[in-house]
Image: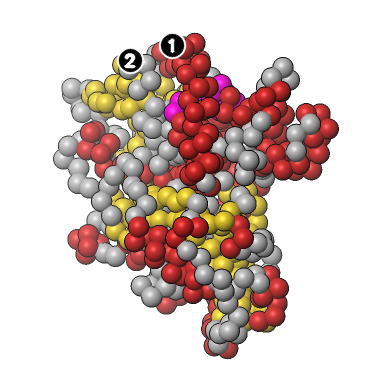
Amino acid sequence: MNRQEQIEHLQTTKEFDICVIGAGATGAGIALDAALRGLKVVLIDKNDFAGQTSSKSTKLIHGGVRYLEQAVKKLDWEQFKMVRKSLRERETLLKNAPHLTRPLALITPCFNFFEGIYYTIGMKMYEWISGSQSIAKSEWLSKKETLDLIPELKAKRLSSSVLYYDGQLDDARYCLAIVQTAAAKGAVVLNHVQAIKFSKNEDNGRLKSLNVRDLVSEEDSVIKAKVFINATGPFADSIRIMANAKLKSRIKVSRGAHVILPREVMKGDTAILVPKTDDGRVIFMIPWQDQVLVGTTDEADELSENPKLEDYERTYLLEYVNRYIEKTVTLDQIKSGFAGLRPLLQAQLQTAMNADTKSIVRDHEVEIDRRSKLVSIMGGKWTTYRLMAKDTLDTIYTEVLKKDLVKCTSEHQILHGGENYNFEDWQNLIVQYGVSEWTAKHLMKKYGTHAQKVLQLTDNQDDLKNLLSPNHPFIKAEVVYAVNEEMAITTDDVLERRLGLKLRDEIASKVAESYVEEVLGVRMSKI
C-alpha cells in the first residue's frame, strides 16, 4: 500500500458508496466486505490501522468460556448465541490468515475432584457447541500429565487439569492484513485522517459529506458518500453525536490490562486459564511470540485515547501468576505491558447504565439514526469482526440503499500474506538470503507469502539484514518495508503495530527508535 496513491484516489473519487470511519478490525472488515460486494468504499482512521482496541487484545480467537458459564448459570440465551457465533467464526479467522494465527492449547488447573468434573463438563459443552469447527477434543488430565505440559506450575495443591483448545492471533497485523486485502480489492484506505465535521442536506438532515483532515500533511478535504458508517469502537458516541447532537450515549468502556513476561516463566506451548479470580474475572497466561502474555483485567473506565498501564494492574496480574507458577515472578521481570479499552454496548434500559462491565454481553448492534442516517456498528469482539461487518452491510442494503442484497463472500477470502502459505518456506529464505533460522521463521509468521518481499530490500543493502535488537529476530529491512509498503507514519505505527517489538520488550524498542526515526525522516523528505 502506498499512502500517496491512496490520497490521490480519495481526491479523484467524486462520490463513494460507503465511507467507513474507524479502521480497527470491524471497520477494516466492513471495508473489505464492501469492496468484495462491488461497492466504492473509503476507510479512514484518526490514528493508525488497529491503533486502539484492536491491537490491545489478549490475542485470542475464542468463543468465551466465561460467557458460556454465565449463559448456563443465568439461562441466558443471548450469551449462549454469542458463544456459538464466536466459536464458528474461530475457524474462519484461523483459515483466512494462517500465517497470523495458530491453534492454542490451554489448561485449566483443578485443585479438587469436583473442579475437575465441573470444568470437564464445561469444556465438553464448549467443544460440542463448536460442532464440526472444533479444533481438537478437550481432556481431563492427571496431575502428572498437567505437569508434563507445564512443569513450571505449582505442584503442591494441584489435583488435575482440563485441557481445551482455542485460537491465537497477531491482532495488529491481522487487522492490517484485512486493510491490505481491502485495498487490493479496490477500497481506498487511509490512516491518520481525522473526521472533522459532517455536512447535511438542509431539507431532511441526512449526511451528504464529511470534512476530514490529513494529520500528516495537515490538508483538509471533503468525502462525499451515500452512506457513512461509524466503526470507532469505544469512541462511537463521539461520531454519533457529531452526526446528531440529540443522540444519547450508548457505549460503556471496560479497561483491560496485560503484562509481558520473559519466556522462561513458561517455556512450553500450552497456556493457562485461571477461570475465576477473587473478584470474578478470568486471567490467561499465554505463550506469545517468544514471550508470555498475562491478562486481562476487566473494570469500568473513563474514555481516553492513550490508556496507560498502571502499577496496581502490574501487581494484580503478577499476584495471580505467582499463585500458579512455582518460581516467584517479580515486577522487574515485566518486559512490557499495555492497557486498552473495550466497547461494551449498553442496553437502552436504565438498569444497564450502572451495570458491572463484567456482566454486560459483548454482542453487537447496527444502529441507523433516523434523521442523519448515520450507521453505527457498536459492541462486539475481535472474533466476530467479520460477522459484525456482514450484519452492517446487509442492513445497509435493505434499510438505506434499498438495493437487492449482494451476498457476503468474506468468509472465503484469504487475507494478504495467506495465499498459498506454507510455513516451511522459511527454509527457502535461509538458502536465498542467508538470514538465520530465527529470523526466517519470524518473517514467515509476520508477513506470510510476502516475507520474500521484505528480504528483497536486502539485495543491495546487506546491512538491512542486521537485527534491531540482539534479543529479538526483527531486522532493519522490516522497518523500511513498514514505512514504504505498509503506510507506517509514526514510530508507534512501526514498533508497536507493524513489528510488535514495543509490546514484547520496551527496552529493545527504545534502542530501535533512532533507526526507525531515521527511516521515517527519509520517507517524509520524499513526500
Looking at the image, is 332 positioned above or below residue 140? Answer: above
In front of the other: 189 or 316: 316
Q: Is residue 482 magenta?
A: yes
Q: Quadrant of residue 318?
A: bottom left
Residue type at mark 1 is Thr
Q: Can residue 139 be seen in this snapshot?
A: no
Identified at 45% across, 51% down, the residue is 337
Image position, residue 250 (x, y; %): 26, 50
Whether residue 54 is visible to the viewer of this picture, yes or no, is yes
Q: Secondary structure at mark 2?
A: strand
* Residue bearing mark 2: 219
Query: What residue occupies the far bottom of the structure in this picture?
Result: 113
Residue 488 point in image, percent of width and height: 49, 27
Circle nearer the N terminus (1, 2)? 1
In the picture as drawn, the residue positioned furthest to the left comes out as 246
Q: Residue at x 62, y 70 (%)?
A: 152
Q: Is label 1 in a helix, a strand or a loop?
A: helix
Of 129 and 355, the residue lying toward us: 355
Task: State the quadrant of the N terminus.
Answer: top right
Callout 2 amino acid: Glu
- Colouring scheme applied when the structure was drawn: secondary structure
Q: Is 202 on the left-hand or right-hand side of 68?
A: left
Distance in Å between CA atoms under marks 1 and 2: 15 Å
Q: Nearer the viewer, residue 348 or 222?
A: 222
- Determine which residue is flagged by label 1: 12
Counting every numbered tag in the picture gives 2
The answer to which image quadrant residue 52 occupies is: top left
Left-right relation of 346 to 289: left
Above-or-below relation of 194 to 152: above
Residue range highlighted in magenta: 481-490
